Image (cartoon, coloured by chain):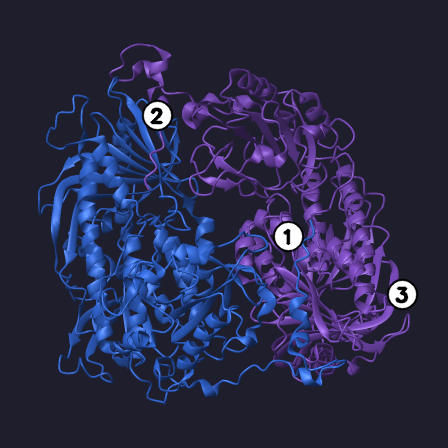
Chain colours: A purple, B blue
């Protein structure tokens, strides 16, 4: 891309416009590839300080673990465990707790949903991006794109820069609205950037130093907007409502609905149905929505429980509405993600998650194509995969919002218009409570569902869904590890080999046969990995999880495994054991993945953690076919196995005090292993 | 303390000399008390970059969790799970693995021992100290204490500054030895600050810009030094030795011993017994010890396994020796901690742990006395408690080092001088493998072991040992929490109340009777907490863990608990339930602590997490007696309960649609609770 600014012209491989969660996740991916030049700009001149999104579903937390920021975020976040439903008691009409469900369905993920303000998420994404890029990739703030031109005659040329973008460096006044808009009665307001204002109204808040006018260009989005208006308060409450530290859905008999979200730092977010209504296409007088008026409405819903605020940190309002773009990209050169292609109401807590997951899907594909490792067609899977996710979300949000805006059905059970039954509410709530786990990418060049795949070999690892972690034991160190933490986000495909118990010679032979194929200079691992890579595991990383029973774990040494494709010499993170650990019990990984120990499997996991292909150890043709579908042969001759010196076993013949050459004695240290557990 | 520097004179409450782990842990404590002025100085002008200590035992990791740095350290550290013993095979004489034990005895702690270089530990301690102190408390580097004077006539006056210290700001040349000493053949060397040099030799390495001479003052330390010399290498090895990622104790038949410590960033530390011997009182020619010569010695021990280094990051050498000061403090004004009062050999990995644990014991006591909350006599417990720990460590290290320096006993089992048997070795190893958990502070004003205490009420919580965490469920949020994370290091004593199942009226009555005592203005909680405190829980923080069975958890609301001593209004971290959680199983806290559910207990935990007192719910006289022993009455009248407005239950009489005043109907929301688990 060609970038013009201040009379200078430069080029960049990737320019990210907008440093919100979607933009930052894209930057985080690209920061891992030092050979790609990346910039990220944002027209606003400061980080968000308050408000905006706060919900983190389990899938996002898994991604955070994989990119290395989970620990810090989890330490700051408010965890949620229970959802309480409050409704008018059928007998008394009084607000009553009618049910509780766990907030994350037990067993879905190792992580439960949590709450942390968007500005902290952005901070940790930026810190990690800075670290990955050795301090190079930072957000350029107060920088606005003015014009964008695409030279369509160049879009298919890999070496060309077909896109020209003009950037403007904004002054402080240009890059932030006046405080009279961002702060109302001393309380920070988010209304200036909410759906209560039109794009034109919002842009009018930003001053322009020169005579130029800001051209408002928004991607065409289609969708519906209801006439319901909701308010949001981030506050420290003083209340006798018992469930103020739980996620609650409260429907009062006559005063509307509230959703309670317990946040970090003792804050609580309330989503409050407001009495205002707005007609289609119109916008509300924003002065009517104040923190005080929202709080008053909430108090009526909570009654007879009391609700006061010891502090209100932020407030905003929004229309309930859902909109979706018809396309997520153009010419495999320009891509939309996050709020730029799907907007909806915030109560389901899905917006920030979906936005980050959009670019977690996109980032590595951009890198693969830019580096020439994969064909440009790979990028088509971005729209194919994420548009379905966005559509499902929009549909869910429409239903979910309606449930919140409707009145609870009375005790007589008569179906009035706009009333909802408890059963219906619980059912829809549960559907949305999947924590991002139901996302299932369809059949494509990247996800082999119907053709050339053997789902039955790992029956509990659905192809298309995200790979989940099981605990394994590291063969070299005997530490118990969550497998996910050993195959973190690096940009590599993972080829997970489950060979069964290789202490049995026939199973070891199968593994050696597979390895011999992988070691060949003319097959996919060697062929698609550029010789210039940091290591032979940079593009396709092979990790073996052996099954273990009865025979001592110590019977085999690392150098007994085929090198370099299975045991990459001196790399102790390649071979794991499905075994009992000293401190964390047994992970039962084969059982967790539904892999038969006598049969084994090879599981291919994409760089963004989705299961792509499952085959048997003999199915090298299917592996070849899979990678051949979208990879490009390395131009530098690839990375043959012979480039890596093997680790040799000890020179036993020269060992001291050696009585004879009997092999069983040569391995004396192996049979002497015992676990002396001292209690 | 009066501080003179550059012709200016200032005062400071606490001056910490030396920003190593002991000094930084002291600073970390004091950073939590904004009303105490603290400075920390170090004569060296840069952080450590390499080498030095690296072992973290489980107790230290528990402390890190409590002060808030565990997550970051754990993410960087190398975990250890297994210790492998390698010895000459009795039959072949060849190096053989003779046994394996878990590196942290399972069940000792939630945390297993880990390895991370001292400079990273110091970084995280400093970052956290900076955060706690709002950016105020930073290490002043290149600052050296020149003279220290104590005015003994003033030491007992609380308001006086009896100590005068002169500080010198050093130039770069003065604060760091020349690179010819810190780097040998391109490899960073730690010998310039090792036990291979005398204090005088070490001081001579630092230039002085003026004519002044550095006076070498070391606290008198008594102890022994053997003639054994060891080398240390931090390296990335290339080896076929199978256990290079485990902690190993290797005894070769003829070439000496090696201990292997797997470090972070693929580094491995080797402790290598060197052929050199040094007579008592003499020092070695340091040029004889190079990274290369140490590696050569290690190679002989590993034979026939190969050992090369792809990189050596740091090396050093040391004499095996143990020394201990006779006193840890003077006049309750000057205190020694860490290396200043106990030095020994590094192989047991205890030095950095013990140093940090010294000041984790001391810091809060200093703060209590300086703030006038406790009597100065409290400080006497520092020496009383830590000197025993240091003595035990020194004794263990003497034995442990001897085992490593001795030759393995031959297969004939004849007890030659300087030979050791495998059994003996394993036994001593296991003793030292307690991971800091056996530390047991003796009977004192702070730890009531013999008098006025009822150990039998919580039989698995030994008085004097550290309080361990069990999982509980937060009553307000239903999240499962490790209790330790809910009672982190703040400086408060914790009064943990285990009242049993208070859904039973007689048990609730006992709790209310205890609360009524605590609420009184003339009893210890009100009396010893200054009215100026941030909250009534600042000095003595009461946390209740109720037992739960059969009756629904939701049957009781927070406002049903006595306020403010048991339920501090609007504070949702005061009441927990020993209950099944949605995602993490059941903590069985009462069982873990050995508390009878029908009897209950009150457990007092010191600010540094050691169990101090165990009594029954009726034993208010014993609690009064305990705190009366060392606390001082607040001069501002204390913090009576009446200062805190109570949370009132909802005004049910004004609730809408209310059919009658029947109390059982008033709580309709309570009996309707059900867990709708959706699978």
Q: Point out the frontmost of discs 3 and 1.
A: 3
Q: Chain letter of disc 2?
A: B
Q: Which picture quadrant has residue A188? A: bottom right
Q: Chain letter of disc 3?
A: A
Q: Where is residue B246 drawn, in percent x and y? A: 38, 36
Q: Nearer the viewer, residue B311 or B29?
A: B29
Q: CA distance from mark 2 to mark 3?
A: 81 Å
SS category of the residue bearing label 3: loop
Task: Answer yes or no: is residue B377 visible.
Answer: yes
Above or below B303: residue B573: below
Residue at 56% from the left image edge and 58% from the top image edge: A73
Q: Which residue is mark 3?
A: A415
Whether labels 2 and 3 share one chain: no
Q: Nearer the viewer, residue B180 or B140?
A: B140
Above or below A257: residue B644: below
SS category of the residue bearing label 1: helix
The label shown at residue A58 is 1
The label shown at residue B306 is 2
Q: CA distance from mark 1 to mark 2?
A: 46 Å
């Amino acid at each position: 891309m060609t970038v013009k600014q201040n009379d200078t012209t430069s080029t960049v491989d990737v320019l990210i416009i907008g440093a919100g969660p979607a933009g930052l996740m894209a930057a985080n991916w690209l920061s891992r590839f030092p050979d790609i030049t990346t910039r990220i700009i944002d027209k606003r001149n400061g980080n968000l300080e308050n408000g905006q999104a706060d919900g983190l579903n389990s899938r996002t937390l898994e991604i955070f673990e994989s990119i290395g920021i989970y620990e810090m975020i989890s330490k700051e976040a408010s965890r949620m465990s229970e959802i309480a439903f409050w409704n008018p008691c059928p007998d008394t009409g009084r607000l009553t707790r009618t049910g509780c469900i766990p907030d994350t369905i037990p067993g879905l993920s190792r992580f439960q949903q949590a709450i942390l303000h968007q500005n902290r998420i952005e901070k940790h994404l930026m810190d990690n991006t800075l670290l990955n890029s050795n301090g190079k990739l930072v957000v350029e703030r107060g920088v606005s794109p003015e014009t964008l031109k695409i030279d369509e005659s160049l879009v298919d040329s890999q070496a060309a820069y077909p896109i020209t973008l003009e950037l403007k460096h904004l002054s402080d006044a240009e890059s932030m609205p006046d405080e009279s808009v961002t702060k109302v009665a001393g309380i920070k307001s988010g209304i200036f950037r909410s759906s209560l204002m039109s794009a034109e109204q919002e842009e009018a808040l930003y001053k322009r130093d020169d005579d130029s006018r800001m051209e408002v260009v928004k991607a065409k989005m289609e969708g519906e907007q209801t006439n319901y208006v909701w308010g949001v308060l981030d506050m420290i409450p003083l209340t006798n409502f018992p469930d103020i530290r739980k996620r609650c859905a409260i429907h009062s008999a006559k005063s509307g609905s509230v959703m309670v979200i317990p946040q970090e730092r003792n804050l609580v977010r309330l989503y409050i149905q407001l009495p205002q209504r707005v007609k289609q296409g119109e916008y509300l007088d924003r002065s009517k929505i104040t923190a005080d008026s929202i709080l008053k409405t909430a108090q009526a819903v909570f009654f007879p429980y009391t609700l006061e605020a010891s502090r209100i940190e932020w407030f905003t309002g929004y229309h309930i509405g859902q909109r979706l773009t018809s396309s997520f990209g153009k010419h495999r050169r320009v891509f939309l993600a996050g709020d730029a292609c799907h907007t909806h109401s915030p109560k389901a807590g899905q917006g920030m998650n979906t936005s980050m997951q959009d670019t977690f899907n996109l980032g590595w594909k951009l890198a693969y194509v830019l580096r020439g490792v994969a064909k440009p067609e790979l990028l088509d899977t971005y729209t194919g995969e994420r548009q379905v996710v966005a559509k499902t979300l929009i549909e869910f949000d429409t239903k979910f919002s309606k449930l919140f805006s409707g009145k609870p059905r009375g005790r007589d059970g008569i179906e009035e218009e706009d009333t909802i039954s408890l059963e219906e509410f619980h059912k829809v709530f549960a559907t949305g409570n999947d924590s991002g786990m139901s996302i299932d990418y369809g059949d494509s060049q990247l996800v082999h569902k119907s053709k050339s795949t053997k789902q039955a070999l790992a029956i509990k690892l659905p192809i298309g869904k995200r790979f989940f972690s099981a605990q394994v034991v590291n063969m070299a160190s005997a530490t118990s590890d969550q497998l996910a933490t050993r195959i973190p986000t690096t940009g590599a495909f993972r080829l997970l080999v489950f060979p069964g118990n290789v202490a049995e010679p026939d199973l070891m032979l199968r593994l050696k046969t597979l390895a011999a194929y992988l070691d060949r200079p003319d097959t996919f691992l060697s062929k698609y990995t550029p010789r210039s890579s940091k290591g032979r595991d940079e593009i396709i990383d092979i990790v073996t999880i052996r099954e273990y029973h009865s025979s001592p774990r110590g019977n085999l040494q690392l150098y007994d495994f085929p090198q370099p494709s299975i045991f990459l010499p001196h790399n102790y993170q390649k071979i794991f054991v499905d075994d009992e650990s000293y401190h964390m019990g047994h992970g039962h990984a084969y059982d967790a993945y539904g892999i038969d120990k006598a049969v084994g499997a090879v599981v291919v996991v994409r760089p963004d953690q989705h299961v792509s292909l499952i085959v048997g150890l003999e199915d090298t043709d299917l592996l070849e076919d899979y990678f051949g579908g979208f990879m490009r042969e390395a131009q530098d001759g690839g990375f043959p196995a012979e480039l890596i010196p093997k680790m040799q076993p000890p020179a036993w013949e020269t060992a001291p005090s050696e009585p004879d050459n009997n092999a069983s004695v040569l391995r004396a240290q192996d049979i002497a292993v015992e676990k002396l557990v001292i209690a």
